[in-house]
Amino acid sequence: MPNPKRRHSKQRTAKRRSHDFLTAPNSANCPSCGERKLPHHACPKCGEYRGRAVVAATKEA
């Protein structure tokens, strides 16, 4: 297999790695309680999804 003739510069390596970062997951507001939640998921606070109670609500201390 061929080997590189010269070492890649730090600038070239950094340009290649510029897209290798993590992005924060999207979030939306729950229409019933206003809590932040993942889109297309039931709200962890009130347990509603699309206006219906689908999960038992969690009790806060």
Image: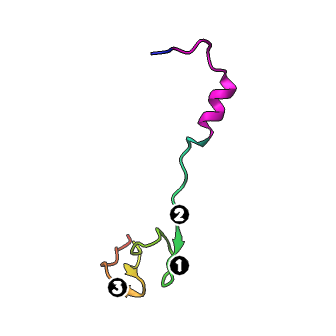
Secondary structure, mark 1, is loop
Q: Kindly identify the residue that appears in the image at 59 percent across and 42 percent down.
A: 19
Compare marks 1 and 2 and give the one earlier in the sequence: 2
3 or 28, nearer to the observer: 3
Q: Kindly identify the residue that appears in the image at 56 percent across and 43 percent down.
A: 21
Secondary structure, mark 2, is loop
Task: Identify the residue position indicated by label 3 in the image.
Answer: 53
**Which labelled disc corresponds to residue 18?**
none
Q: In the image, is residue 15 above or below residue 55?
A: above
The percent position of residue 51, horizontal first and vertical second, equals 42, 87
The percent position of residue 22, horizontal first and vertical second, equals 53, 47
Identify residue type, mark 2: Asn
Secondary structure, mark 3, is strand
Position of the N terminus, as image quadrant, is top left
Start-end of magenta stretch: 3-18
Of marks 2 and 3, the one in the foreground: 2
Left/right of residue 43 with respect to residue 7 in the rendered view = left
Task: Identify the residue position indicated by label 2 in the image.
Answer: 26
